Image (cartoon, rainbow, N blue to C red):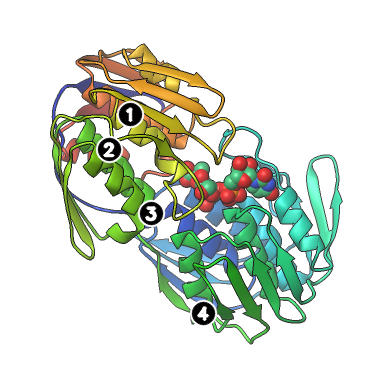
Amino acid sequence: MDTIYITGGRPLAGTLAVQGSKNAVLPILAATAAIPGRFVLGNIPSIEDVRVTRALLEGLGLQLCALEDQITVDSRGPIRSAPDPELAGRLRSSVLLLGALLARLGRAEIPLPGGCVLGERPLDLHLAALKSLGVRVRLEEKRLLCTGRPKGGTVILPYPSVGATENLILAALGASGPVRLIGAAREPEIQDLADFLTACGAKLSGAGTPCLRIEPAPLQGAEHRILPDRMEAASWLCAAAATGGTLRLTDLCPDQLCPVLHVLRQAGCEIQAGEHDLTLRAASLHAPGAIVTGPYPAFPTDAQATVMAALLRASGSTLFRETVFADRFRHVPALCAMGARIETAGDLARVRGVPALHGAEVRATDLRGAAATVIAALAAEGKSVIHDAWHLDRGYGHFIERLQLLGAEAFAE
Ligand code: EPZ
């Protein structure tokens, strides 16, 4: 998708099954490079980041076959230690191959990863943790050269980085002794990775807590169904809330969305949640109180932009504080071009509700910012044109079809 055309002002209504989680499938695909075996993965989302990761793994020598929402992986043959630089440069999560290749080969040559532009995306936490397990790290001009099989030991993460936690778990699979990870991230996607690795025979305990322990164990292939995507679910809920609609979502885990559901309820939405489904009925919204993002189980940074878009017409004002990424208000200019009243200063953004939004021609800036821009266009009166809509392809499968299914007047070219 390059450009999306939306005529706003219509409430969204209908039922959607939530896709498999982008942020769960990417580390699990990387993990197949760490373990010689045959894997069958279900509930795979149809998104660009998965397509790029598949190409990266095939370039390393793994055999992959995709059929509808299933991928089979055969990693029993010899594999290379250096992923394709151009492909790896397109995806920040390619850095997860670092841990997987160190576990499998004791060597990894990883190009410095690309991907989301969300301020500075350093790797210092990943590298310091790997070094503390005896891995030798050499930073060359455009790549990281890491050698040495990780040793057992205790690693302290000063910040619960999701990627660093996942990289350390993957590296620990090949460690010569038990690895303890203190200060680990607790996101549901990490728990899904742990469930997958346990099915492969890993001796891993503490997933979902700040203290993880991984012990050496023989590993083999496994089957696994990917966790539902809580961020895709949040995006659709915000679209229904912004347009005064009614939405039923199935195949999700509402418990993993508590902070987002709490804010939407505080803003006036009626939400009924079952174990694996959820119905939202929107009303006229009012400001829900301050929103501060943070590591799980705090309010998720990946829902900051989409919830902001849902509240643009809420009466009163909402203060957002973004504590996870340095530059995650890049979507604000596009929302203001549609008539939103938003002021930003450093990690703070204040949204003052306006009675109406109007269509505009704008440019998307990143994955979740693009979703927020679509949500604002759906709530705006008149036509909007959103350029660089390809950002959405990275994390939202069949996006336009699903929008149209909910009654939106939208098309893409
Ligand atoms: C993961 O990114 C997710 N991506 C992100 O989702 C998500 O926003 C983020 O976690 C936080 O929840 C995937 O899972 C593929 P971090 P990751 O390491 O691992 C700093 C989306 O929209 N940091 O937890 O890169 C970093 O700069 C994407 O789906 C260091 O300083 O996030 C950031 O400020 C966007 N040094 C903070 O920590 C490091 O070595 C959180 O980063 C690593 C990170």
Which residue matches tag 4? 198
Mark found first going from the N terminus, 2 or 4 = 4
Within 10 Å of disc 2 (Cα), the crowding (few <14, some 14-19, many 20+) is many
What amino acid is found at the position of numbered circle 3 in the picture?
Pro
Q: Is residue 405 above or below residue 2?
A: below
Camera-side residue: 62 or 394?
A: 394
- Quadrant of image for the C terminus: top left
Mark found first going from the N terminus, 3 or 4 = 3
Q: Give the label, 3 or 2, closer to the camera.
A: 2
Within 10 Å of disc 1 (Cα), the crowding (few <14, some 14-19, many 20+) is many
Which residue matches tag 3? 45
Q: Residue at x 27, y 14 (%)?
A: 359
Within 10 Å of disc 3 (Cα), the crowding (few <14, some 14-19, many 20+) is many
Mark found first going from the N terminus, 3 or 1 = 3
Residue 185 location (% of width, % of height): 56, 59
What amino acid is found at the position of numbered circle 1 in the picture?
Ala
What amino acid is found at the position of numbered circle 2 in the picture?
Cys
Evaluate if marks 2 and 1 touch, with contact meaning CB atoms under 8 Å apart: yes
Query: Residue 238, which numbered label?
Result: 2
- Is residue 343 found left or right of 115 in the rendered image? left
Mark found first going from the N terminus, 4 or 1 = 4
- Quadrant of image for the N terminus: top left
The quadrant in which residue 302 appears is top left
Seen as rendered, the residue at the extreme bottom is 218
